[in-house]
Image (tube, helix red, strand yellow):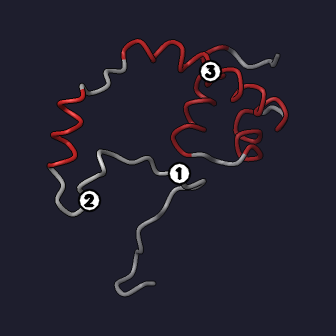
Amino acid sequence: MSRLSLANRVLLALVWLRQYPTYSVLSLTFGVSTCTVGRIIESDCVLLWENVQPVILWPSKCEWRYLRRNRPEMPAVVGCIDGTSHEILMPMVENQA
């Protein structure tokens, strides 16, 4: 698929999962085409999920209920996923909008 080593393919996929840089940035960083970046992300993220999924422990129904009651400001929420396509940076200057 590409000239990247397995270690660099995994690293590329993990960088994408952690920071969501554009394919162009990953292409320049790893020295491969943007099409290759897309193919690596599509295939390797599935492989990563298949390997880590058995060690993910979901809470029991009782634990979910406890988590729901533990946040009075949002009683029906037990967690959230940040779905932004890029990192949100904190303002560096006071009163910065």
The reply to whether the C-beta atoms of the residues labelled 3 and 1 are less than 8 Å apart is no
Q: Which residue is mark 1?
A: 83
Nearer the observer, 4 or 15: 15
Which mark, residue 74? 2
Amino acid type, label 1: Gly
Task: Give whichever of discs 1 and 2 has the lower sequence position.
Answer: 2
Task: Give whichever of discs 2 and 3 has the lower sequence position.
Answer: 3
The residue lying at 26 percent from left, 27 percent from top is 59
**Residue 13, located in which quarter of the rendered image?**
top right
**Residue 37, located in which quarter of the rendered image?**
top right
The residue lying at 24 percent from left, 25 percent from top is 60
How packed is label 3: few (under 14 Cα within 10 Å), some, or many (20 or more)? few
How far apart are the alpha carbons under marks 3 and 1? 18 Å
How packed is label 2: few (under 14 Cα within 10 Å), some, or many (20 or more)? few
Q: Which residue is mark 3?
A: 46
Q: Image check: 92 left or right of 67?
A: right
Q: What SS does tag 2 mark?
A: loop
